[in-house]
Amino acid sequence: MKKQLPPGQFETEKWPILHTGDVPEFNEITWNFRLFGEVKEEKSLSHKEIMELPKTISNVNMHCVTTWSKFDTTFEGIALRELLKFVEMNEGVKYIKIYGYFNGDRFGYSANLPLEPLLGDDSLFVYRWKDKNHDWQDIDPKHGYPLRFIPPEVFYLWKGSKWVSGIEFMKVDEAGFWEERGYSMTANPFKEERYR
């Protein structure tokens, strides 16, 4: 995979932990993943159902808005396109919001994204990872266990919701958690789209 350091970034071999709010405890019995919004019929999947879906392994470069970049991390997870098979989207859906836990609210965090760039192998709901310094291991709770979204590298990493809980399908783009607080709606690190 080609390494290109976006402007204003530095390279690190570590995977820094940055988030706001507390770290939730995973309860497999109560955990579920909702697909809702502009769809013909909403769908909810259990953790077992999610983990039975076809897996994708992909090498991803991560770029955080706080200026670090980590190259060549390999993730295993479920490609976003696999989840799309469970719903029939209404005509005109072009955007999604990926929700995650924030301070006791399963849907307290969200990140908005355009749907079209998320249909490849580099758009994953991940549960384990490795790099040149680490063998395969589950992502830990501070990194988003049991399931965390990792976006393609054309988005800053805040678009990668931790402790994911669902996807809302939208016809019109709508600000998520950090976007409401002044961050860029599009968040392309190579264009240095940090703030609105």
Image: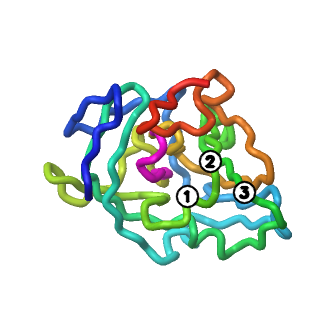
The three-letter amino acid code for the residue at tag 2 is Leu
Badge 3: how crowded within 10 Å, few (<14), some, or many (20+)? some
Residue 30 in view (yes/no): no
The residue depicted at 49 percent of the width and 35 percent of the height is 23
**In-image side of 107 versus 129 (left or right):** right
Q: Quadrant of residue 190?
A: top left
The number of discs equals 3
In the rendered image, residue 25, in percent from the top left (x then y), is placed at: 51, 43
The residue depicted at 37 percent of the width and 39 percent of the height is 63
**In-image side of 6 versus 164 (left or right):** left
The residue depicted at 26 percent of the width and 29 percent of the height is 10
Position above or below: 159 against 195: below
Which sits in the foreground, 174 or 22?
A: 174
**In-image side of 2 versus 20 (left or right):** left
Q: Earlier in the sequence, mark 3 or mark 1?
A: 3
Q: Nearer the viewer, mark 2 or mark 1?
A: 1
Q: Determine the secondary structure under disc 2.
A: strand
Q: Which residue is mark 3?
A: 94
Which circle marks residue 117 in the picture? Answer: 1
Question: Is 153 one of the magenta-colored residues?
Answer: yes
The three-letter amino acid code for the residue at tag 1 is Pro
Q: Marks 1 and 2: in contact by CB < 8 Å?
A: yes
The three-letter amino acid code for the residue at tag 3 is Lys
In the rendered image, residue 117, in percent from the top left (x then y), is placed at: 55, 58
Q: Quadrant of residue 93?
A: bottom right
Q: Which residue is mark 2?
A: 113
The Cα–Cα distance between marks 2 and 1, rounded to whole angstroms, is 9 Å
Q: Determine the secondary structure under disc 3.
A: loop
* Segment tinted magenta in the rendering: 148-156
Question: Is 72 one of the magenta-colored residues?
Answer: no
